[in-house]
Amino acid sequence: MKKFDLFIIVYCIIIVLSVMYATQPLQPLLAREFNVSITKASQFTAIIMLFLAISPIIYGYLLEKVNAKKMLINSSIVLFVTNIFLGLATNYEWFLLFRTIEALVVPAILTSLMSILANIDKENVKFNMSIYVAATVFGGLVGRIFSGFIATNFSYQYVFYSLSLAILISIYFVNKLSYEGEATIVKPKISDVLSILKDKRFSTIYLLMFCVFFVFAGVLNVLPFRVKDISSETSEFQISLLYLGYGMGILVSLNSKKIIKYFRNEINTILVGLIFFLFITIFLTVPNIITMFMLLFLFCLGMFTVHTVSTGLANSMKSSQKSLTSGMYLTFYYLGGAMGSYLPSIIYEKFGWNVVIYMFCVILFVIMLLIVKRRRIF
């Protein structure tokens, strides 16, 4: 694969993930701007997670094959326009409408990019997929910090205008991609889905990632409101810096083989990561922003260890139907993220941060017991 093609794909991934997570540090500001509750402001991130969860089903039944490059360009044009309108939106309803339109096209863009990356250089698929994962993590990190910095020093509207400019540049680059192939989209059959879910190994891994990402997304989505409660003078840029720990995902994804080797196998690694994740989550009750900043590095380390190893394990347990098993994994993963981005905000609004954290700890403890009980089946 040409280095320029790889650069284009990585750039597009970073921009799309930046769009996905740009609203997260801004949620207290947007809630104040549109005079809405914490729960309603949380929907700006949750809506995209939800569509990422159900997109394999929707696209699977609407499309079987589509030109990946054309889908990427057309979806990016929609994303370019919607980001301009997000900057222009003057009320909650219009902002949510344009965010929902974005939620429809983001999965199409990511599907196209993954398909191009997997097919443009078939000899290095595993390496290219590790680049994809690292680029998504980096994009989520950049999007959060970038939006916080722009909103603090200029205004939140310029966050979306700047992203539109970045998307426009990506459209220009995509036109220069040498790949012209099709993206094959899996059409899931109910019988196949049920067959996979009956396998306790898959149902356990899917439930694990639903719970883990529920907790992870919940903490990161409610975090800006918690920080504002601790210190109302905290700026959006300072809030965004709390997400620097997200970068641990890059280190974990690129060193997953070494981590698994150290703990001898995948299940041991998952259990250690899960216990560590639970242990750090407990200490997020400490009402100190500096302490929270440091804890979030360890929090992200635990989550990404479980996620990275679980992804590899889920893809290796069945020699056939890999597209369906990985698609189902992503569905459970993002469904957990969608619910985690929304439901904890309701609990936080009514009962406060500590109750939310205790709930997360109970969820993690229960799923940990399930993994211990079923570890022999793997």
Image: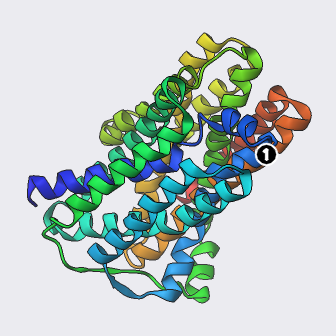
Residue 271, above or below 63: above
Residue at the extreme right of the image, as rendered: 350
Q: Does residue 33 appear to the left or right of 313 in the view shown?
A: right
Residue at which label 1 appears: 39
Q: Position of residue 295 (x, y in %)?
A: 58, 20
Where the N terminus falls, by quadrant?
bottom left
Look at the image and tell me whether residue 350 can be seen: yes
Residue 150, above or below 187: above
Q: Label 1's element?
A: helix
Which of the pair 191/128 is nearer the observer? 128
Which of the pair 314/338 is nearer the observer? 338
Q: Position of residue 340 (x, y in %)?
A: 69, 48
Residue at image location 71% in from the left, 38% down from the top: 33
Snapshot quadrant of residue 274: top right
Residue at image location 67% in from the left, 33% down from the top: 29
Snapshot quadrant of residue 178: bottom left
